[in-house]
Image (cartoon, helix red, strand yellow):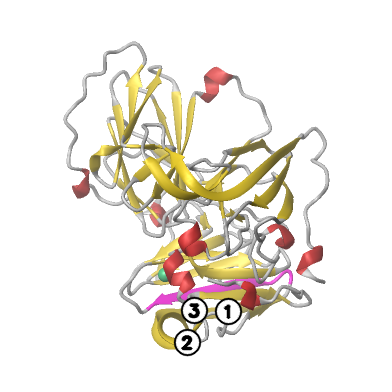
């Protein structure tokens, strides 16, 4: 089977609708709502790109066009387990779309939750310059608007000297009725972790990387460290006083939720830098999982470190996997149906947000300590210096999949390899993954 033939369906599921978009990638100045100009690469001249939303069972069809991004562009659906030919990985699942070219992506919206999209071609610096947007899929069962409450999708992104949350720099203000449910969908589109803290209300982390947690408990005065590429969905009930979401402990960044009708005098914000970090490996309640990660069919150890290795045909002090740099890291070979286990060892002094395409992984343990909370499925997990993570997944989505560090400069410097299913081939030359 060729990945070129592993494509999405042409029609939505029964009762669903087709959601069609055209995204044209281009260079050019984009002006933020408060008036600041950004020298950007963007989809449709917007930062972030157009929000893609759907209801479970819909068909998402996106026509990507490239106006003038010289190195080419793609669309990768981060965390969405699309058929491999829709994954947008140049050199593995397609050729990058060159200026004047086009590629049509189609997939069914069968995962509910918070995701995002970005180019995967020369993704450093192309994502940093603005080629990203959000993808949110709602459950099919319709709830009345009042019951849904306020639902905000908040990607954080850093341009050279400006940080935006949603589409604004600084601190945005939103009104909410006391008693109204509020959902905050936090998305880290940068290459380094961000900290979030919520002041003025208890809350629950109801989903991580788009997947619901089992019985997440109410917490307050905890710090949330969101890995590069990762997503947390927070839910709270609006109190009758201000609630502030702080970004990176900075009182001038984040959002202010104001009780509707109230004047909303600003309270003095505490120093949230001292708050303990919420440990997701011990959060929520255990539940059965669909396979035994200790009884895996394949087991790969992935050692991350700096090393002298060839990058783009030149010797470099690379970001290496097992002492080698992409494309010289050997492929990981699996069979459909395998339970696959990764041991990810970080021997370096930097954090590596590990991201496997096409499959969420179940976290088994970190530094030998097994998870004790809700089953935790992630598509991007931060392996900090010195840490060892054990994760597992079911190989149930045939293809040729990129498996890499989502600190995009690290990826560019070699920290990437491929997971290849037995019997699947790619006609797309990996040397086309040009920088
Ligand atoms: Cu890294």
Question: In the picture, residue 296 is in which quadrant?
Answer: bottom right
Q: Secondary structure at mark 3?
A: strand
Q: Position of residue 393 (x, y in %)?
A: 60, 65
Q: Is residue 196 above or below residue 71?
A: above
Q: Nearer the viewer, residue 226 or 309?
A: 309
Q: For ligand 1, tell me if the residue under mark 3 lies within 8 Å.
A: no
Tell me the distance, in whole angstroms, between the alpha carbons under discs 2 and 3. Answer: 23 Å
Q: Which residue is mark 3?
A: 302
Q: Is residue 385 above or below residue 286?
A: below
Tell me the distance, in whole angstroms, between the alpha carbons under discs 3 and 1. Answer: 10 Å
Q: Nearer the viewer, residue 169 or 366?
A: 169
Question: What residue appears at the point 48 percent right and 71 percent down from the top-left corner?
Answer: 412
Q: Can residue 206 be seen from the camera position used here?
A: no
Q: Which residue is mark 1?
A: 299
Q: Which quarter of the rendering shows the N terminus?
A: bottom right
Report how many numbered discs are placed on residues in the image. Answer: 3
Question: What residue appears at the point 37 percent right and 33 percent down from the top-left corner?
Answer: 35
Q: Which residue is mark 2?
A: 314
Q: Secondary structure at mark 1?
A: strand
Do the residues under discs 2 and 3 have CB atoms within 8 angstroms?
no
């Amino acid at each position: 089977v060729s990945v070129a033939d592993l494509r999405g369906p042409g029609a939505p599921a029964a009762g669903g609708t087709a959601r069609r978009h055209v995204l044209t990638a281009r260079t050019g100045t984009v002006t933020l709502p408060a008036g600041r100009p950004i020298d950007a690469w963007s989809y449709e001249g917007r930062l972030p790109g157009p929000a893609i939303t759907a209801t479970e069972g819909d068909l998402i069809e996106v026509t990507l066009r490239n106006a003038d991004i010289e190195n080419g562009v793609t669309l990768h659906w981060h965390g969405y387990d699309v058929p491999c030919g829709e994954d947008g990985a140049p050199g593995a699942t397609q050729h990058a779309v060159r200026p004047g070219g086009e590629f049509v992506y189609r997939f069914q919206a069968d995962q509910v939750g918070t995701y995002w999209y970005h180019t995967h071609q020369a993704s450093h610096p192309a994502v940093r310059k603005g080629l990203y947007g959000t993808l949110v899929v709602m459950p099919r069962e319709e709830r009345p608007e009042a019951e849904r409450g306020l639902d905000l999708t908040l990607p954080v992104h850093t341009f050279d000297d400006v940080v935006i949350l949603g589409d604004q720099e600084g601190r945005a203000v939103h009104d909410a009725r006391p008693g109204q449910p509020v959902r905050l969908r936090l998305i880290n589109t940068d290459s380094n972790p961000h900290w979030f803290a919520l002041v003025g209300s208890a809350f629950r982390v109801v989903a991580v990387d788009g997947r619901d947690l089992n019985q997440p408990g109410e917490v307050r005065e905890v710090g949330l460290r969101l890995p590069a590429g990762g997503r947390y969905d927070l839910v709270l009930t609006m109190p009758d006083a201000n609630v502030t979401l702080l970004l990176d402990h900075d009182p001038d960044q984040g959002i202010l939720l104001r009780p509707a009708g109230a004047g909303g005098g600003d309270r003095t914000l505490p120093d949230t830098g001292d708050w303990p970090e919420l440990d997701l490996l011990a959060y929520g309640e255990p539940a059965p999982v669909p396979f035994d990660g200790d009884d895996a069919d394949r087991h790969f150890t992935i050692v991350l470190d700096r090393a002298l290795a060839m990058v783009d045909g030149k010797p470099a002090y690379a970001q290496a996997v097992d002492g080698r740099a992409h494309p010289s890291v050997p492929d990981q070979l699996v069979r459909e149906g395998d339970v696959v286990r990764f041991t990810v060892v970080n021997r370096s002094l930097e954090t590596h947000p590990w991201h496997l395409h096409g499959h969420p992984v179940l976290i088994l343990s970190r530094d030998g300590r097994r998870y004790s909370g809700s089953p935790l499925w992630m598509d991007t997990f931060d392996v900090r210096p010195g840490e060892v993570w054990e994760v597992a997944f079911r190989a149930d989505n045939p293809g040729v999949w990129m498996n890499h560090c989502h600190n995009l400069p690290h990826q560019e410097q070699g920290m990437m390899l491929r997971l290849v299913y037995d019997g699947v081939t790619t006609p797309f030359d990996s040397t086309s993954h040009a920088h």
